[in-house]
Amino acid sequence: MVNQLLPDDADLDNHITVGGILNSRLTRAELTVLMCEDTRRARSGELPEPRVVVSSNGLVIAKYHQDTAFKRSIDGADIVDVDGMPLVFATRLLCKTPLRERVATTDFVKDASEMAAKEGIRFYFLGAQGDVAQIAARNLQRAYPGLQIVGTRNGYFSLEEEAALCDEIVQSGADILWLGLGSPKQEAFALRNRHRLAGLAWIRTCGGLFDFYSERLPRAPQWMQGVGLEWLFRVLQEPKRLGGRYMLTNPVALYHLMTKTHD
Ligand code: UDP
């Protein structure tokens, strides 16, 4: 499919512990190539189940140490990438070989879309309210002509509906399921349903991604992302919903970052 250098198994097994969570060291570019290679493997039946790819940030670290079901979901994922500049700073401070970069899902989706449009990799968007995922799909298709998004659906459904929903996703011919249900719902859904999604290459959790790409919510300016303040921008936008959340979790995340980050 692609001729670029693939991350070999050594890279995939090359981990770093950040705030107590085992994270991948893959960069955005390496993950993009892996997505391509996994799609080839899934289409030829070499991947029995989709790979579950999730992200870590301060909220995830705090929840990981407080909620055993959530910890099980994160530990059960195949790849945990680091979506949070403060986490990258912690590795610079505490590790011999720090992380090379942050893998922000909102940026990674651009790399992934560009590659997918070129290689014919098909996406499915599941999550967010109303037609937000559909609008996000349209916007990304406009930005990446040729990108195939073979289905979209909002993220509000019951446990009983999941089996039929998974059938629908498999039938759509999707390779990559982008799953934006927020934490811990999306991680639990991924682990609970991966066996129903055989044939897909990846289940990629993506939090509020569809809200950003539907332009329902603006993204933090570049300088705030760079200095690790994207979370503050989000709090200022939605103080009622997110203020308490970050005030409670930031000190907890900081404690785990300082005491449980190592090569
Ligand atoms: N969401 C959903 N189904 C649910 C609960 C939430 O689709 O049952 C969506 C919600 O509409 C939003 C996204 O999940 O688009 C996650 O939002 P949040 O910002 O809380 O997630 P984070 O990025 O912090 O993980």
Image (tube, rainbow, N blue to C red):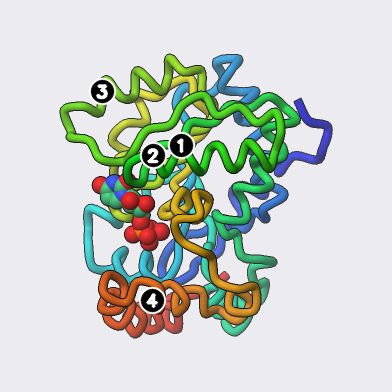
Closer to the chain start, of discs 2 and 4, is 2
Mark 2: secondary structure: loop
Q: Crowding at label 4, few (<14), some or many (≥20) Cα neighbours within 10 Å?
A: some
Q: Which residue is mark 2?
A: 131
The answer to which of marks 4 and 1 sits earlier in the sequence is 1
Where is residue 2 drawn, in percent x and y? 78, 30
Q: Earlier in the sequence, mark 2 or mark 3?
A: 2
Residue depicted at x 49% and y 53%:
80
Residue that lies at the very extreme toward the right in this rendered image: 3
Secondary structure under tag 4 reads helix
Asked if residue 29 shows in the view, the reply is: yes
Q: Secondary structure at mark 3?
A: helix
Q: Report the Cα–Cα distance between label 2 and label 4.
A: 24 Å
- Callout 3 amino acid: Ala
Q: Nearer the viewer, mark 2 or mark 3?
A: 2
- To which residue does mark 3 refer? 163
Q: Is mark 4 within 8 Å of ligand 1?
A: no
Residue topped by disc 4: 235
The crowd level at tag 2 (other Cα within 10 Å; few <14, some 14-19, many 20+) is some
Q: Quadrant of the N terminus?
A: top right
Q: Earlier in the sequence, mark 1 or mark 3?
A: 1
Q: Earlier in the sequence, mark 4 or mark 3?
A: 3
Query: In x, y percent, where is residue 200?
Result: 49, 25
Q: Quadrant of residue 197?
A: top left
Callout 1: 10 Å neighbours few (<14), some, many (20+)?
Answer: many
Give the CA separation, mark 4 to mark 1: 25 Å
Tag 1 residue: 134
Q: Nearer the viewer, mark 1 or mark 3?
A: 1
**Quadrant into which the C terminus falls:** bottom right
